[in-house]
Amino acid sequence: MSAILLPFAAPDEVDWAAFEAHVGRTHDAGLAPAINMDTGYVQLLGSGDLIKALDVANAVTGGDYVAGAYVADEPGAAFDPASYLARCEDIQSRNGTPVIFPSHGLNGHGDEAWLRAYNHLGERLDRFIGFELGAMFVPYGRIVGLDTFAGLLEIASCVGAKHSSLRRQPEWERLALRDRRRPDFMVLTGNDLAIDMVMYGSDYLLGLSTFAPRAFALRDVYWATNDPDFYELNDLLQYLGQFVFRPPVPGYRHNAAQFFKLRGWAASDEVPAGAPKRPSTDSAVLADIVGRLEEWESRPLPQVSP
C-alpha cells in the first residue's frame, strides 16, 4: 500500500488532475493507493476535498484502495466514536477500507483507553486497519505497548495495523507476536527509514513509495523472486528515504512535491498552507535520485508465478 501525495497547484488549490493521474499510476504499478493519509495532508483538508479524494480513488481503482478516517479535535478531547464511524462510512460507501487515523481523543488517554476505543469501532465495522503513528509525524501520535497491540489482534474486523515508530525493534516484536497469535494479520510497516522490513515479514503502507511506485513494485518482485537486484534497488530507495524523512519529518511531503515536479508529474511543488517546506536546494539531490530511479523503472516488470 502506498500513501498518496495530494499535489497542490497553489497553497489553496489542489491539483486534482495530477492527483488522479498519480492514483492511477500507483494502482497500475500494483500497489493499493492509500488516500487521505498524512502524505495526503488529511489534517489540513476541508471536508469537501476529503470526499473528492475518495471519489477520485473509487473511480480510478474500483474500490482497491484504503483511506484515512480522521477526526479533527483538540488536546484533551474525548474519544468521538460517532465522528469516527461517520468518516469510516464515507470511505466504505465509496468501496474503500478505512484506516483509523490518530487524534487527540483516540490517543490522548492511555493505552487501555486506546484499546477500548478500537474495540468499540471493531464491534461496528466489518473491516478496518489500525494505525500507530509516532509523535515525530503528528503531536497526537502514539505508539502503544506490546500488550496493548496484542489486544488489537483479538479484534476480528481489524485486518492489520500500520506501525510508524521509525524503529525496527518494536516492529520486530509485533511481527513475532503476530506470527504466534494471528498469522493473517498484516503488520504494515510505516518505517520509511527501514523499508527492508519486508525482509522480516512486514507488509507496507509507506509515504516513501509515493515518490516512485513503479520502482517499489519492481523491488517487491525482485524480493519475491529471490533476485539479487532487490538489494541494489532497495539501497537506492532507502537513500531517498533517509534524505527526505530527516527532521523535521513532516517536511518529506514537500520533498515529494519537489520530486513530482522534477518527474513531470505535477507543474508545481507547492504545499498547502500550514505544511512545512524544505529548502529549494534539496531539488539538486532529488534530481540525481530521479535520474537513477528512472534507469531502474525503464526495466520491464517481471511476472511472478502464483
Image (tube, grey):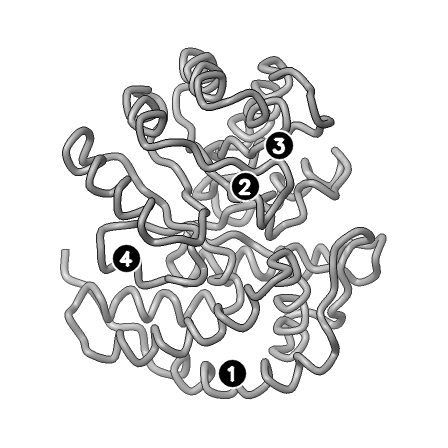
Q: Position of residue 42 (x, y in %)?
A: 66, 42
- Mark 4–mark 2 Cα distance, whole angstroms, equals 27 Å
N-term mark: 4 or 2 = 2
User: Residue 284's quadrant in the figure?
Assistant: bottom right
Q: Position of residue 291 (x, y in %)?
A: 51, 87
Tell me: 47 left or right of 118: right
N-term mark: 3 or 4 = 3
Work out whether 158 lies above or below 183: above
Q: Amino acid at mark 2?
A: Asn
Q: Amino acid at mark 4?
A: Val
N-term mark: 1 or 4 = 4
Q: Does the residue at mark 3 contact the one at mark 1 (Cβ under 8 Å)?
A: no
Is disc 1 surrounded by few (<14), some (14 to 19) or many (20+) residues within 10 Å?
some
Q: Which residue is mark 3?
A: 70
Q: Which residue is mark 4?
A: 198
Query: SS of the residue at dot 2?
Result: helix
Q: Position of residue 175 (x, y in %)?
A: 24, 43
Query: SS of the residue at dot 1?
Result: helix
Q: Classify the position of the C terminus by image quarter.
A: bottom left
The circle on residue 214 is none
Q: Which residue is mark 1?
A: 289
Query: SS of the residue at dot 3?
Result: loop
- Residue visible at 54% across and 49% down? 60
Q: Position of residue 199 (x, y in %)?
A: 23, 60
User: Residue 238's quadrant in the figure?
Assistant: bottom left
N-term mark: 2 or 3 = 2
Q: Amino acid at mark 3?
A: Tyr
- Mark 2–mark 3 Cα distance, whole angstroms, equals 18 Å
Q: Which of 243/33 is in front?
A: 243
User: Residue 44's quadrant in the figure?
Assistant: top right
- Residue visible at 39% across and 66% down? 216
The circle on residue 58 is 2
